[in-house]
Image: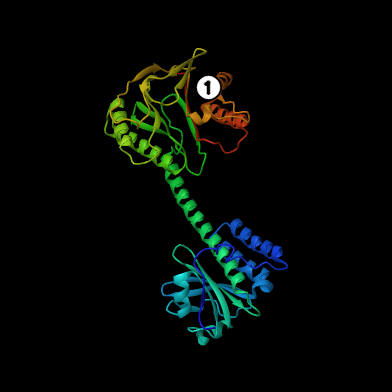
Amino acid sequence: MAELKIVKEGPPAAPEGAPPHRTGHKAWYRKLERTLDAIERSHDMADMLSAALSSIVRDFREELGVVGGRLYERKGSRYVLMHQTGKSRAPIGYKIPIHYAPIKTLLQTGYILMRESDPGFDARIEETLGVRVFAAILVGEQDEYAISFTLKGRIDETRTSYALNTIRHVINLKLRQQALFDILLEAREIQVSLLPKSDPKFAQYDIHGRSIPAEVVGGDLYDYIQVSEGDLGLAIADASGHGLPAALQARDVIIGLRMGMAEELKIVKTLEKLNRVISRSALASKFVSLFYGELEVNGNFIYSNCGHPPALLYHREKFRELKEGGPVLGPMSDLRYLRGFVRLRPGDILVLYTDGVSEAVDASDTEFGVDRIRRLIVYNARRSSTEIVDRLLKAVQDHSGLTTPRDDQTVVVVKPRSR
């Protein structure tokens, strides 16, 4: 051969790069699908790369002439052998320098097919591996891994290029997907750290809250803020949408509330300041509904509802919706908010919830609705706050038939105990 055979990133477009039609091409595709499926089912990077390597060496001897394979990881200025399978005799830890000509080409193109007669082939390096003809691919956002295959017999260059570049493409997609998922897990850890670690011990009140995200992270949050020894802040927020943008916005609201209360700002002033911050935000998800109230030891409850589903106060077998406040936070920077006032007495129940609870639908698109929430409160009025929260969320799950909700669901229940 007079030159190296090089193919750019990604599987070649048909018909040029597609495998030639011949007897057995369906079986060839089935083997390729098995390899891709093994990649998709792998749960971490080591499993995925090992699965891809083993599958190719096991299944493609006849079609591609693959008899051995090696997995390298880049460490500094070398690619270091981490794993091998089939006819491959190099010691684990064997190092190939990045200035080696085939590696330079590989770093430029992502794929290479090379014979010992090609310029740049170094017999001293390849002899240790037992290689005269090889194909290799690079994978990873920073080309962290190289997968090399020993080839023997008659080699169909088009088919080899197509198969390995397809596999390379799928591995890179999987790695990007995993990287994104890792970021979401980190965001989830941050979000969980903002949720209360336990229910507050506040005077003679039984308080419990719970939040179920629709995705790894969600746009719902709730919080308890100890404003003073005799004053407890209760907050529940719902950022528009769900997922990471909504989670970040809900996080900012909770942090803003905590800061406002630490500065001893009044409820209305804190909410108006929060609204200005959210309104100037560059996030696409910048509409946040919020219900915030401060509960005093004597049962006085001062609140403001910023476009949130009204909290329900069950008192003497009647319900009162706590609506006083203003619009959702975010659309306009100069909004004004009002305060509402109620008093909690022994036997009363205060329920805060997000619209993921009331608007959860069943198979016929019927919402769970506020009436069902009310009936459940009445039926379980003598139970603890924890039991009411659990039974309400279970009833919503049964209604929708989904174990993972379509929208984030959060409930906080407050019950004054008899003095």
Quarter of the picture containing the N terminus is bottom right
Q: Position of residue 127 (x, y in %)?
A: 55, 85
Looking at this rendering, what residue extends furthest in the front direction? Answer: 15
Q: Using the image as rendered, state which of residue 322 and residue 133 is in the foreground.
A: 133
Quadrant of residue 336 within the rendered picture: top left
In the picture provided, is 164 more to the left or to the right than 144? right
Residue type for callout 1: Val
Q: Using the image as rendered, state which of residue 53 and residue 223 is in the foreground.
A: 53
Residue 257's place in the image compared with 150, above or below, is above
In the picture provided, is 338 more to the left or to the right than 154? left
Q: Position of residue 385 (x, y in %)?
A: 51, 27
Crowd band around label 1 with a 10 angstrom C-alpha radius: few (<14), some (14–19), many (20+) = some
Looking at this rendering, what residue extends furthest in the right direction? Answer: 23
Residue 194 visible in the shown view: yes
According to the image, label 1 marks what residue? Answer: 370
Element type at marker 1?
Answer: helix
